[in-house]
Amino acid sequence: MLAAAVIVPLWAGTLTDAVTCRDWEVRARRRWIAAIALLPPFGSAAWLAFGRPRGPVAIPDQPMHPSMYWAMQRELERDIAAFENGSFTTG
């Protein structure tokens, strides 16, 4: 019972963290999400140790893969929509 009280919040927090990271901040983000979802204690520990971005991540210099342009455009559109709705928060 005590183990579940620790593992479930850890799993939920790391899964939420992996899902909300931007595409260009984390390499192989979908694989990290699958590892966290399918292997709760081990995937969560691996995410915290190796997968999570450590600090502010700079937007990569040219040349970028075309999918990165689309990911950045989606993020920008989402942020603009949130700003217009008044739900934009920094941090």
Image (cartoon, rainbow, N blue to C red):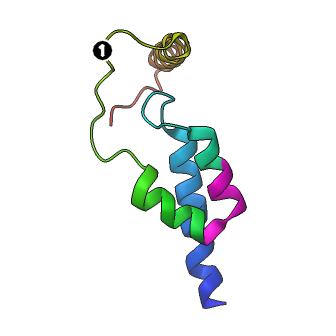
Instruction: State the image coordinates of residue 19 (x, y, percent, origin top left).
Output: 58, 42
Indicate the position of residue 80 as horizontal and vertical percent values.
46, 13
Q: Nearer the viewer, residue 67 or 86?
A: 67
Residue at 60 percent across and 60 percent down: it is 12
Residue at the spot 33% in from the left edge and 21% down from the top edge = 59
In depth, the one of 75 and 33 nearer the eye is 33
Magenta-drawn stretch contains 35: yes
Quadrant in which the N terminus appears? bottom right
Amino acid type assigned to the residue bearing label 1 in the image? Asp
Query: Is 55 drawn above or below residue 43 in the view shown?
Result: above
Q: Residue furthest bottom?
A: 1
The residue sitting at 31% across, 47% down in the picture is: 54
Question: Is 13 covered by the magenta stretch?
Answer: no
In the rendering, at what x and y percent does residue 20 appear? 53, 39
- Residue, disc 1: 61
Magenta region, residue range: 34-41
In the picture, measured across the screen, residue 32 lies left or right of residue 80, that is right
Front residue (pair 60, 77): 60
* Magenta stretch, main secondary structure class: helix
Quadrant assignment for the C terminus: top left
Secondary structure of the residue carrying numbered label 1: loop
